[in-house]
């Protein structure tokens, strides 16, 4: 069985066009990162234009509170007493 022979030499890189492939890869990555940086730099002005074209609605944006106010006929002391009794009763369960 033949053993694989690996020769690690600079000439193998030159023969396999390793330098040109590496430079091409670095140029591609450089341009991609440049485009990303330009997009990030231009993003505030893009968002301003979008905000002018499609403004956010003015007014109340969230649902009303699920808590109902205490009726005028029920005193706060009575509500506090009912709450304390429920807490005490449910604490035993």
Image (cartoon, grey):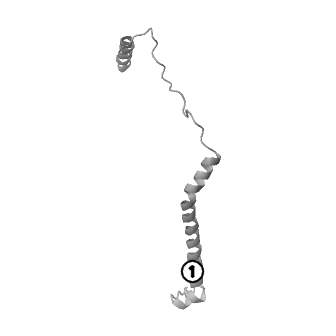
Provide residue 57's location: percent of width, then percent of height: 60, 38
Q: Where 19 sits versus 64, above or below?
A: below
- Tell me the residue at 62%/48% (across/down): 52
- Number of labels in the image equals 1
List the single residue furthest toward the top: 73
Q: Residue at x 58, y 52 (%)?
A: 47
Location of mark 1 (residue): 23
Q: Residue at x 36, y 15 (%)?
A: 80
Q: Nearer the viewer, residue 78 or 19?
A: 78
Which residue is the extreme one toward the right? 53
Query: Quarter of the image holding residue 29?
Result: bottom right
Camera-nearest residue between 76 and 26? 76
Q: What x and y, as percent, mark residue 54?
A: 64, 45
Out of 58 and 35, give the one closest to the viewer: 58
Horizontally, residue 77 falls left or right of residue 67, namely left
- Look at the image and tell me in which quarter the C terminus lies: top left
Q: Residue 68: x percent and y percent?
A: 49, 20
Say few, some or many: other residues with alpha carbon within 10 Å of mark 1 (under 14 / 14 to 19 / 20 or more). few
* Quadrant where the N terminus is found in the figure: bottom right
Looking at the rendered structure, the secondary structure element under dot 1 is helix
Outermost residue toward the front in this view? 52
Camera-nearest residue between 68 and 88: 68
85 vs 52: above or below: above
């Amino acid at each position: 069985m033949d053993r694989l022979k690996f020769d690690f030499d600079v000439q193998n890189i030159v023969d396999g066009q390793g330098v040109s492939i590496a430079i091409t890869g670095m140029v591609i990555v450089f341009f991609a990162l440049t485009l990303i940086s330009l997009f990030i730099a231009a993003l505030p002005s893009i968002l301003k234009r979008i905000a002018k074209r499609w403004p956010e609605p003015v007014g109340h944006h969230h649902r009303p509170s699920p808590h109902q106010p205490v009726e005028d006929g029920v005193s706060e002391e009575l509500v506090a007493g009912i709450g304390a009794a429920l807490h005490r009763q449910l604490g035993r369960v």
